[in-house]
Amino acid sequence: MNRLLNKCLIFLQGFLLLNIIWYLAFAIMRTTVIPSPITIYQNFGTVFASQIFIHILFSLKRIGAGLALSLAVGVPVGILMAYSENANKILYPLIYFSYPIPKTALLPVAMMLWGMRDGSKVAIIFLIVVFQVIVSARDSVRNIDPSVYLVTVSAGASRAQIIRHITLPAILPELLTSVRVSLGTAVSILFFVEGYGTKYGMGYYILDAWSRIDYIDMYIGIVVISIVGFALFVAIDLLSGLLCRWSTPLK
């Protein structure tokens, strides 16, 4: 409970500071492109009429699918690279080369392969997250103290049992930290990937308002997607605290 209250306090502090900066920008620039935050919050009730919760659910579905695929692929690959030097020699150059490539540049390729619908959007989110998961899993396994394995090895545990009972719990804190960082990137990329081939999603909501020069709805969408991103960040953080009680909690 204290952890949740601390996160809420951090959110309120950041929210207040951001709105002060926003209001100063409005007061100094005096342009319709930057409306007053007071005006935005006064019109916040319009999100219910615009079915924004449907947009949020579609975005969360895409993020969830991309994240699940990233963990399903990234964790085994990372563990394999940590345990097998041959696998690491083959895969690490590929990951090292591929990781810096802007994943949004691959959106046209993804759309040709998986269509304009959810498939291409999930693919881009997967590509954004999976490399961080692989690197995090590999490095976390390599940082495990070898003495941790002694008891299970001497007891005759199989490789699968060692991975299940030693490796996975040991890498979980760093893995969840990597996922938390990746989620921020995945949420931000929705603005781009949801602008094509769909009528639902927070990215579409913002782009649609922008194309109609409806800056009020546009900023409302930006505020909502920011809150959703923060909620996901906190959810992973709380999950980390629940599953990794032995680990030092983040401040």
Image (spheres, rainbow, N blue to C red):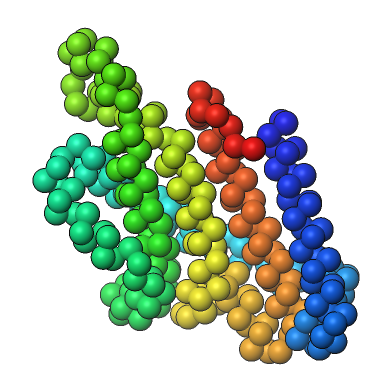
Q: Is residue 222 above or below residue 130?
A: below
Picture quarter containing residue 95? bottom left
Identified at 34% across, 71% down, the residue is: 101
Question: In screen coordinates, is 155 left or right of 164?
Answer: left
- Work out which quarter of the rendered image holds the C terminus and state it: top right
In front of the other: 55 or 209:
209
Identified at 49% across, 62% down, the residue is: 186
* Percent x, y of residue 143: 33, 34
Q: Is residue 102 above or below residue 69?
A: below
Picture quarter containing residue 221? bottom right
Outermost residue on the top side: it is 155
* Percent x, y of residue 204: 58, 76
Identified at 55% across, 66% down, the residue is: 188
In front of the other: 29 or 8:
29
Question: In screen coordinates, is 203 left or right of 110?
Answer: right
Whether residue 204 is visible to the viewer of this picture, yes or no, is yes
- Work out which quarter of the rendered image holds the N terminus and state it: top right
Outermost residue on the left side: it is 86
